Amino acid sequence: MAIEVTGLVKTYGETRAVNGVDLTVAEGEVFALLGPNGAGKSTAVEILEGHRTATAGTVRVLGIDPETGGRDYRERIGIVLQETAIEKELSVREAIDIYGALYPRRRPVGELIEIVGLEAKSDARIKTLSGGQRRRLELALGIVGDPELLFLDEPTTGFDPSARRQAWTVIENLAGLGKTILLTTHYMDEAQALSDRVAVIRSGEIVAEGTPETIGGRADAATVISFSLPPGTRPPGLGETLEEGGLYVMTAPEATSTLHRLTSWAVAEGVELGSLRVEKPSLEDIYLELTGEAAGE
Ligand SMILES: Nc1ncnc2c1ncn2[C@@H]1O[C@H](COP(=O)(O)OP(=O)(O)OP(=O)(O)O)[C@@H](O)[C@H]1O
Ligand SMILES: [Mg+2]
């Protein structure tokens, strides 16, 4: 196991930021921690990085206790913190150079700049970079030491959509090299695209864990069929409900036969089903359910 956590607790005064977390991540696995603001994700990740001390519990990362692992430990891991304080007068190239000097096995500066797509900014001072460009630099700094294990705390927050896809490719490539990756994200599509397993954390506790496809009973959940009808059309009466915005929605435990009845009705009536969709609940639907943030709650 690359990461083994048992009974992890972190308190700040009265606040139990992490409240008894058990977690294992296998070598080469990409694992995502999901959860609302203040759920305890960064706290947990920073304890694993060795940046914070645990109140209780045991933590082993690469077989090492991060609290006492020291330099040997830090040389084997890469970190992209949620917030970093880099010297803003440095240029992109200088910053990568300086951070790289801390590691025995460093990747070439030019290669890193290319990986994160900062070629046009390599000599620009950090203080002149946009938010997303800074985040890209931080990603480069996280992998400068060619780490075995990478911690990414919200690695793509502030990225434009194409930069996010590029970052995904970088992360996928790292995973392809067999690196273990623990990431946090608020983007469910990101978790879905990148992770082998995800855990949802709420108020310091893991409330669900599994693959993105099966977590929270997602794979077994009924299929949702939705469609719209031309104005004035009488609905089929197959158990659909009319939602705000004029969309009809039906839940179908047996999607194939339900869809057959619906489309047979539509063809017989000569009605075109607009915006027809057939889908399982998304990871985001499941997440909202698990964290009690669904509309109306
Ligand atoms: N240094 C600190 N001192 C006191 N309380 C803290 C400290 N750091 C975090 N907390 C509290 O611990 C809880 C968990 O915070 P944490 O930063 O781990 O959340 P998070 O899941 O990373 O949230 P976000 O999605 O907003 O990044 C919060 O209630 C926060 O206020
Ligand atoms: Mg955080």
Image (cartoon, rainbow, N blue to C red):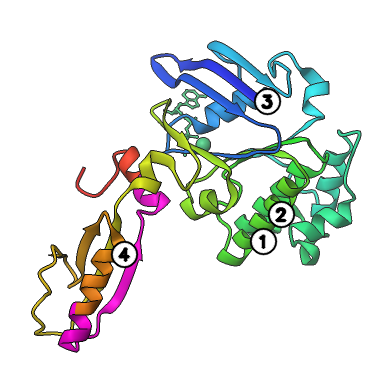
Give the magenta-colored segment's residue range.
265-287
Q: Nearer the viewer, mark 4 or mark 2?
A: 4
SS for dot 1: helix
Kindly identify which numbered label has been placed on residue 256: 4
Q: Nearer the viewer, mark 1 or mark 4?
A: 4
Q: Position of residue 226 (x, y in %)?
A: 26, 68
At horizontal 73% and vertical 19% (from top left) the residue drawn is: 63
Q: Nearer the viewer, mark 2 or mark 3?
A: 3
The residue that label 1 is drawn on is 166
Look at the image and say whether residue 285 sits in the magenta stretch: yes
Horizontal side, residue 22 vs residue 259: left or right: right
Q: Are marks 2 and 1 in contact (CB under 8 Å)?
A: yes
Q: With respect to residue 218, does 77 lie above or below?
A: above
The residue that label 3 is drawn on is 1
At horizontal 21% and vertical 64% (from top left) the residue drawn is: 249
Measure how far apart labels 3 and 4 are at the Cα level: 41 Å
Measure how far apart labels 3 and 1 are at the Cα level: 29 Å
Horizontal side, residue 144 vs residue 180: left or right: right
Q: Residue furthest bottom?
A: 270
Measure how far apart labels 2 and 1 are at the Cα level: 6 Å
Q: Nearer the viewer, mark 3 or mark 1?
A: 3
